[in-house]
Amino acid sequence: MAGTITEKIFRARCGREVTAGEVVMAPVSGAMIHDITGPLAIEKFYEMGGEKVFDPSKIIMLFDHQVPADSLNAAENQKKMRSFAREQGIHNYDIREGVCHQVTLEKGRVCPGDIIIGSDSHTCMYGAVGAFATGVGSTDMGFALRYGCLYFRVPESIRADVTGRFEKRVGAKDLILRIIKDITVDGATYKAVEFTGDTIGSLNMAGRMTCCNMAIEMGGKAGIVPPDQVTREYLAGRCACPDRDLVSDKDAEYSSWRSYDVGDLVPQVAVPHNVDQVVDVDQVAGTPVDQVFIGSCTNGRFEDLQEAAEVLGNRSFADDIRVLVIPASKAEYLKALRSGIIEQFVEAGALVEAPCCGPCMGGSFGLIASGEVSFSTSNRNFRGRQGSAEGKVYLGSAATAAATAIYGRITDPREVR
């Protein structure tokens, strides 16, 4: 029976033929919780009569949203999670490694063909290595922690076929914003978005993570890239994954098939207050900003920092704006530190913070006040997302963010010479 990569993953995990639309109880390969959602999931686990988790080796726990603890509530939540980890013998437990999604992948806790759940909507980022990965609520996570499985409706798939070569200083973030504009914020609701084509095949893992990370911004249940040599090279030394042949059949059925050519793609910007409100950068160029944030699980990797540093060169950031640079993980931070990029950012006037989510969800530090404008490389620009509901958040690439930080207004990075 012909199938999409998503259908094939569910067939393998369920041990029988299944098709899109079918409701199945599927075993999970791993379950991730963090310091915001973890305590609620743990409560649900106990409410369901849980005593021991289904498999401590498959539970992943990370602190990233409010680290170090920035309130008594945050401290108590983290205390609860530390206690749970000790009680359950959970060793996939990181309190200082960085953003959960980046760390989960770089620690080799996801393999192609896995079904991974996380109590965070951007868990879909793990699809970059060919896994089916999705975010779930606290009740579902509590159930999975106890039983090691969960009900799913096998998603239909949207195929996004991408061809062409990017212009200089145009890349994966611009591509995914363009796709979201096309599909809209709810156009992929409960569907898997499968990224294919020569352009996707030529993307490094950082770019693939960016695309899969933002599948949820279209309403997607998952984002997924068929595993290939890039995947194998990334996973080598991180985990012992079976070399599975995972690719959709030529006659697989899709709910829609969309084609994109990046040859004429220009830097894209999502304007307040929805992620699908995307325009070419020249339509908002010159808009003054108060803060620039380069980081998050979407664009906080070394490749993103390197992209920003290339645009920055030996310049300084504008004096009258705040620039926050937050690497996605300790490993990415160290790469940037050893390359000299961190020093470059600090000398240019940035505040470089320890790996964490930072202002992305507006719950920790780096918030904007009423009437202020943030330009961010993160994934959401909803009203109040990074602080005041009276503030505004624009989204774009690390290159566009760096250009904007240099001049204090939204700037096309291709114009920085």
Image: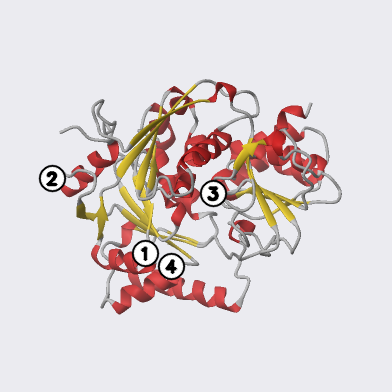
Mark 2, secondary structure of its residue = loop
Is the residue marked by circle 1 packed among few (<14), some (14-19), or many (20+) residues within 10 Å? Answer: some
User: Residue 153's spot in the image, x, y percent?
Assistant: 26, 53
Residue 241 figure quarter: top left
User: Residue 187's spot in the image, x, y percent?
Assistant: 42, 45
Disc 1 versus disc 2: distance between alpha carbons?
31 Å
Asked if labels 4 and 2 touch by Cβ distance under 8 angstroms, the answer is: no
Q: Residue at x 31, y 38 (%)?
A: 255
Identity, as a three-letter code, of the amino acid under mark 2:
Arg
- Circle on res. 263: none
Residue 59 figure quarter: bottom left
Q: Is 13 rendered above or below residue 170?
A: below
Q: Is 258 rendered above or below residue 345?
A: above
Disc nearest the viewer among 1 and 4? 4
Residue that label 3 marks: 297
Mark 1, secondary structure of its residue = loop
| Coloration mode | secondary structure
Residue that label 4 marks: 38
Residue 238 appears in view: no
Disc nearest the viewer among 3 and 1? 3
User: Residue 395's spot in the image, x, y percent?
Assistant: 63, 46
Mark 3, secondary structure of its residue = helix
Give the mark, 3 or 2, whose residue is nearer the N terminus: 2
Asked if labels 1 and 3 touch by Cβ distance under 8 angstroms, the answer is: no
Give the mark, 1 or 2, whose residue is nearer the N terminus: 2
Residue that label 1 marks: 90
Closer to us: 279 or 77: 279
Identity, as a three-letter code, of the amino acid under mark 1:
Ile
Residue that label 2 marks: 16
Identity, as a three-letter code, of the amino acid under mark 4:
Gly
